[in-house]
Amino acid sequence: MKKVKANYPNPKWGVLAVFLLIGLAIAIGKKDDQPLRAFARNPFQSSEPYLYLPLIVRSASETLEWSQHAHNAQRTSYTPQTVAYPWRWRWAWNGPDERGSIGKVTSNGSLPRNVQPVTGDGRVYIAAGQDGVFALDEATGGQIWNRRMIGQVNSTVAYDQKTRAIFVVSANGMLYKLNAADGQILGEFASGATSLLPLPPLLLPDRVIFAMGKKVFALDKDTLTRLWVYDANVDLETPPSYSATRNLVIVGDQQLYVHAISNSNGTGRWRVRPVHPDLAAGETSDGYNFAEYRYGWPVVSENAGYVLMKVRLDWESLYPDFGITNDAIRHLLQRYPKQQALFVLDLDNGSVPFIANIGHGGYGDQSYLPMGPQPVVKQLPNGKDIVYTVIRGHNCHPVPWTSHFGEMVLDDTTVSGLSGGEIRWIAYDWQGEPEVCSYLLTDEQPNVSMAGDVLFGGHWEAGLSLRILDRSDSRGTFYNRITSEYLPTIVTSQDNPAACPFSPSHFCPNGLENTRPYNPGFYIYYRQGNVYDRYWSEYAVWTVSNQNIYFRSADGAVVALTSGNPELQDRYHKPLADLMIAPSVRPNHEPSKPEAVIDFHQARQWAEHWVIVTGEIKYINNNGKKVLLGFSEPHRGYFKVLILKEHWSNFPSSPEKLYQAGQTIQVSGIIGWYQGDPVIYVSDPDQIR
């Protein structure tokens, strides 16, 4: 029997009578005068009764599995499937060991950026870079097979139910067809080009479509024979998406053009460049005044007849004040069009019908912002499409405390009083403290996905989840937001042992704390600190498939949750009675002096060692939280020095004023990790000379 909360059913026509009876019982017991709240009480301390209902199994024709990137061919990142609440820990892979310490599986401990777990035939399939593709048991997380020797797989794979095959796009330019049961290669197709970008394949009923180099290929799924090829004459930077109503394939290229391709014969229908003409295509040498599509994908709204294209903008896009009304935001984006971060294009001709009131954000730092969240498109019961994403606009806090979960409408009939491109605020606070000044950090915007009325956010340290409650037309302004109930958070590491001891359930009802406090939920590791900095992938996401909720963390762990009592241990876990977990610390045999003097290029090889690093400062930045001394510009991928705000008082003046670009320094300390790069944290000026 499956434990399902009585006030959160997921009815199906075949059992409608059962749920009508349940609904009647709930209606009789409900108090009519109970007010709606922006935040429901802590669901882990609820005294509401539970009903035990039989598990409903769907037939193959009703499958709602997340079988390709962003769930479907339209890349909407939305599924109508929900997993009955409450949730419990089921298993984890490439993350914790049975004691909550670090127990990695992949060669580098992480996963490629943008990779999502997909499912089919009772298995979970994960692209793992140089390690190829893993297939896991859906129930236990145990490894079934691992296909290597197919190049570097940086793209989410796709499962096809018809052929019972996995389609894999490799960085070597090959498309592989694998047997889903054992990983054996059934066929392959050579594109003649290569790319390290995530370019997941697109599955349609009769064909598989993928982009590589300058071309888009459509292949027969059974034989891998070529049906058509489209040559964009410029490198493509997004995977293809598909509109069934127009029979169009959509891709974006390096020069910021969007291409609409006929799926009938591969001919071009239209090609437009929606971004401002003064924006350079691709990151510039100084990191300013550019846009790019890479690490994003086209999102199709079939019912509205649009395709949505998110662009990455530079660090300066963090600073404009977006205001708290649609009129103010629209005025700002009209006055400063280079700040437009999401473009809505008509599927019929590529024209832009209106400005989307969306600004840029994403989890970056120190002069770097990544692509940021891709929009979710959800079909409402009335057949209208609505967009869920992260929006900008605040009047309580300065930058970067200015983002929120939000809705965007695509016409003037979905929400009374709003027109296409206008937004609505959703009430949510990741610390569980409801107030009008709640926020998400703009330089930490989470990646979004959605299942039913549950909205998910994949942050670099934590997975956020909330259930939309009241989105009636009267709500959605900054001061009268769409109401929500916060659901469990999942943090990378529970670093507050006073809140709860380690448990195989990985659940803590008393709150979570990694580098900051969060509301109750689950933890991946126990007292392991900032694991993500060592295994940084710049991406985290939730997916929902076949009664499992998957969280892929920024350190490359994959966690499976399912319906059940969160405090009960899963039957696949070994009992760990009276388990005591020691904090993650360095060994007590540390040397009495630095072990070596090294060049900054060697820092990665000396991680966890006390050394003196020599190099020339190329870049200095103070973001208000820390001062960064960079040895390369851009600093990403290279050794750096970080001086946290709490240590600035140890210096004779502001640290950024004591040092200058072009100066050669030596830095002493233990090399650690920050967002995947080697770093020395300096707390005393004597560490630098």
Image (cartoon, rainbow, N blue to C red):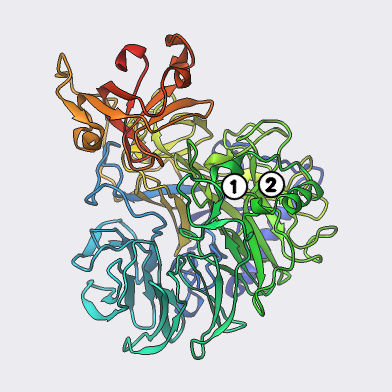
Location of mark 2 (residue) = 426
Q: Nearer the viewer, residue 512 or 348?
A: 348
Using the rendered image of the protein, determine whether residue 269 is visible from the camera's viewpoint: yes
Q: Assign the N terminus to one quadrant of the image.
A: bottom left
- Mark 2 or mark 1: name the one nearer the start of the chain: 2
Which mark's residue is nearer the viewer, 2 or 1? 2
- Against 472, residue 95 (above or below) is above
Given contact means CB atoms under 8 Å apart, are the residues at marks 2 and 1 in contact?
yes
Task: Kindly report the distance in space between the C-alpha atoms of the residues bearing marks 2 and 1.
Answer: 10 Å
Using the rendered image of the protein, determine whether residue 578 is visible from the camera's viewpoint: no
Give the residue type that dot 2 points to: Ile
Q: Nearer the viewer, residue 72 or 380?
A: 72
Q: At 47% from the left edge and 60% from the top edge, which residue is drawn?
A: 294
x and y, in percent, of residue 396 in the image = 71, 31
Location of mark 1 (residue) = 466
- Against 636, residue 625 (above or below) is above
- Against 204, residue 614 (above or below) is above
x and y, in percent, of residue 497 in the image = 38, 24
x and y, in percent, of residue 68 in the image = 43, 69
Q: For mark 2, give the secondary structure.
A: loop
Q: Which quarter of the picture shows residue 76? A: bottom right
Give the residue type that dot 1 points to: Leu
Left or right: 254, with 482 as reference point: left
Q: At 36% from the left edge and 13% from the top edge, which residue is drawn?
A: 685
x and y, in percent, of residue 331 in the image = 78, 50
**Label 1 crowd (10 A; few <14 / some 14-19 / many >=20):** many
Q: At 71% from the left edge and 50% from the top edge, which residue is drawn?
A: 336
Residue at the far right: name it. Answer: 417
- Against 616, residue 521 (above or below) is below
Q: Nearer the viewer, residue 15 or 74?
A: 74
Q: Assign the C terminus to one quadrant of the image.
A: top left
